[in-house]
Amino acid sequence: MTSFTSPLYRDLFGDPETATLLDPAAELTAMIEVERALARAQARCGMIPEAAGAAIDSQLKTYLPNPADLATGTASAGVAVPALVAVLRDHLGAPGADYLHFGATSQDIVDSALMLRCARLLALYETRLETLIAALTGLARAHAGTGMAGRTRTQTSTPISFGLRAANWARPLAIALARLRYLRRAGLPVQLGGASGDRSILGRDGRQIADALAAELGLAPSAPWMTDRHPIGDIAHVLSSLCTALGKIGADVLIASRSEIGEIRLEGAGGSSTMPQKQNPVAAEAVIALARTASGLASLIGTNGIHAEERDGAGWMEEWLVLPQLFAASGATLLRAGELIAALRPAPEAMTATLEASGGQLLAERLSFALLPHLGRAGAQALVKRAAVTARAEGTPLAAVVKALSDAPLDWATLADEAAGLQAAAAMTEEILAEIDATLADET
């Protein structure tokens, strides 16, 4: 048992829908789907008798052996397929038993079944992502003009808007969604290679059978990829990128919801065992922890990409250990992120207070660029830096101090207006939202 499936941590790290798609029954069901589809394809192409293909398809449609009954055989063979095929043949009898698993090898069944389950998992994540992106773009549009302090390297920098921050949260998620859609619809390949990947036992009809199997399963036609594990690597990379983007949201919320900042509030935030006043940002913390875990698991897939010779049992087994955990972490990250965004409440009054408390220091860049034509870059920056020190010491607005130190004929009222600078943030918000719309329109 892991934290993903522990009853204690179920609501913190768990994802019941992902767990169902990863459980042993789902794994065996997918393998049987592949065996049935292979029989249908071979019967249609005349490779096996039609009666045998029909028997395999119909008699295995609702049959599912107990996974525990296959454990000893799986340990002996290092893969579940031989034990599974044995019990399926016992269940079938003649004429299906002789033609079940005809010309296939264990890796064909395991990898094609894995692609089936990946397609279902990615479809689930697409739905969750669509909901999450819609919520974030809604926040972006609603707060395109809600001013807040931008922060770089933990320090306040220039005025932006909360809408821009939300749009920047949504953009990498839209890219991840587009990639998920592409993988599911065009990039999940069928595996049918036979013992050494040349389809020799299938004869001249090998390509035809493989293409027919792909069509039956809704997968992409493909040459055998027994040691070319890029389909697994592509999935791991997209999930890692997705979780990284979600983790960034969690990190931003963690900071913005701090007691002394309070620019974001979280409904239903967690409490402390000893301090009644606390509202701990549990959902944000969980998103970050899960995202880091997912990225670490994805890196294990990356380092396992080298499979030796025509088939590599050790590399293959490592995928079975890591990939389910990667999906479990990714699904849970999406769930917790959805809960986080649903509970998120921007606090414009706190954002405004931060801007006002800066005494106009966030306008330093704007003022130095305005002075550049009159003093040169070095002179302008030196004057504004000197003014910033004075303004902080005296509690005077920065623009007023700069104006007093300069005789440049500038529109000082406009330069001192923080709201005027939000127009750029609002425009950038709209630009990013348009890019998101275009990204997702290309993939629908």
Image: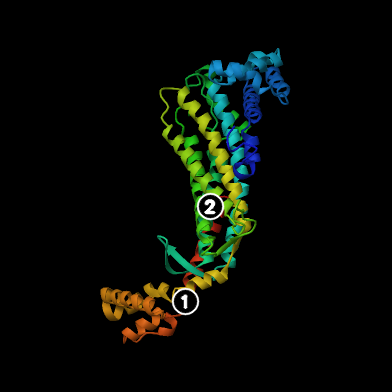
Say if residue 114 shows up in the picture. Answer: yes
Q: Quadrant of residue 5?
A: top right
- Residue at numbered disc 2: 173
Q: Position of residue 328 (x, y in %)?
A: 57, 39
Say if residue 226 shows up in the picture. Answer: no
Give the amino acid type for the residue marked by disc 1 in the picture: Glu
Task: Please tell me whether residue 389 is drawn above or below residue 179 in the rendered image.
Answer: below
Q: How many marks?
A: 2
Q: Residue at x 26, y 73 (%)?
A: 378
Give the amino acid type for the residue marked by disc 2 in the picture: Leu
Instruction: Say whether disc 2 or disc 1 marks the residue closer to the N-terminus.
Output: 2
Q: Quadrant of residue 347?
A: bottom right
Q: Position of residue 273 (x, y in %)?
A: 61, 50
Q: Which mark is residue 162?
A: none
The N terminus, quarter of image: top right
Q: Position of residue 264 (x, y in %)?
A: 56, 62
Instruction: Give the farthest residue toward the front.
Output: 274
Q: Residue at x 71, y 21 (%)?
A: 54
Q: Which mark is residue 418?
A: 1
